[in-house]
Image (tube, helix red, strand yellow):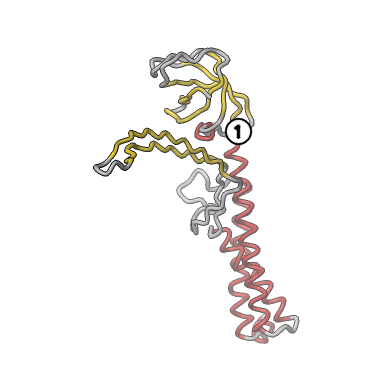
């Protein structure tokens, strides 16, 4: 063993010092993550959110609803020119499925060092010059980091899909099930499809008319878990 280590070049020794510990840590992280060890304590060795690079990549597109209410008064100046005066009330609602792709996590960085180290070692030991073997390892390491980040993103998306986020209802159409009183004087109920589920939700309206059963409405805002709706 000592003879084998002594026969290695300084570059290969450095690469082994990165690759071997990183591989052991990655294996431990995987084992602890599967077994659930460390989730009840103060330190979670399999934590995937330690170093977040802030790359928030939306998994799907976003829907944008633009509501514009323009009130204009017409006046004239000294020369008889028309001078419009008024105000614009603009509400923009953006909703969609945003699941962040966290690239720089602890597991991602460990995977980068492990994969890049072993690929570089294999390339240089196979006769490839170091100036080619090292970049090849770095590229492989980045692919490994991206793969880990994608797996974490997909796993979190599966968890999130099981929890109803009422913010996703903003901009969606619904049908009044129980009449909704006017001017926010009380709550009724609407039915709609939210996150693939057909749901019955509490709703309130600030319009001047009663929204009767069967009326088509649109969700414009959210008050806790109560939907704010208006006639479609």
Q: 194 or 38: which is nearer to us?
A: 194
Q: Is residue 128 left or right of residue 41?
A: right
- Residue 199 percent coordinates (x, y): 59, 23
Residue at (59% x, 30% y) in the render: 194
**Image check: 22 left or right of 87?**
right
Residue sitting at 57 percent across and 49 percent down?
58
For the point 45% across and 30% down, the residue is 221
Q: Position of residue 150 (x, y in %)?
A: 63, 53
Pick the quarter of the image with the N terminus.
bottom right
Q: Name above or below for residue 214 compared with residue 147.
A: above
| Location of residue 204 by image quarter | top left
Residue that label 1 marks: 195
Question: Picture coordinates of residue 16 (x, y %)?
Answer: 63, 75
- Please rate how many residues cluster around mark 1, counting C-alpha atoms within 10 Å: few if below 14, some from 14 to 19, many from 20: some
Nearer the observer, 16 or 176: 176
Please tell me whether residue 170 is drawn above or below residue 53 in the rendered image.
above
Q: In this view, does 181 lie to the left or right of 96?
A: left
In the picture as drawn, the residue positioned furthest to the left comes out as 78
What secondary structure is found at the residue carrying circle 1? loop
The quarter of the picture where residue 27 lies is bottom right
User: Between residues 194 and 204, which one lies in front from this camera angle?
Assistant: 204
Q: How many labels does the image show?
A: 1
Q: In this view, does 111 lie above or below 133?
A: above
In the image, residue 220 above or below residue 10: above
**177 or 226: nearer the viewer:** 177
State the residue lying farthest toward the right: 126
Q: Name which residue lies at 32% across and 41% down.
A: 83
């Amino acid at each position: 063993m000592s003879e084998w280590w002594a026969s290695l070049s300084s570059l290969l020794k450095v690469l082994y010092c990165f690759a071997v510990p990183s591989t052991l840590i990655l294996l431990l992280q995987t084992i602890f993550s599967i077994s659930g060890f460390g989730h009840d304590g103060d330190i979670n060795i399999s934590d995937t959110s330690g170093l977040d690079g802030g790359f928030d990549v939306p998994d799907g597109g976003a829907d944008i609803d633009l509501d514009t209410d323009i009130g204009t008064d017409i006046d004239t100046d000294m020369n008889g020119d028309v001078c419009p005066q008024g105000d614009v009330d603009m509400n923009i609602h953006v909703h969609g499925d945003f699941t962040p792709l966290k690239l720089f996590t602890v597991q991602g960085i460990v995977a980068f060092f492990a994969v890049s180290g072993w690929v570089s070692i294999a390339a240089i030991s196979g006769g490839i010059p170091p100036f080619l073997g090292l970049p090849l390892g770095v590229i492989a390491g980045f692919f490994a980091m991206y793969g880990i980040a994608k797996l974490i993103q997909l796993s979190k998306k599966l968890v999130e899909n099981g929890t109803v986020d009422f913010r996703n209802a903003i901009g969606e159409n619904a049908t009044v099930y129980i009449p909704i009183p006017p001017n926010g004087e009380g709550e009724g109920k609407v039915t709609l499809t939210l996150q693939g589920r057909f749901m019955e939700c509490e709703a309130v309206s600030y319009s001047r008319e009663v929204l009767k059963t069967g009326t088509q409405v649109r969700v414009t805002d959210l008050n806790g878990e109560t939907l704010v709706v208006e006639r479609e």
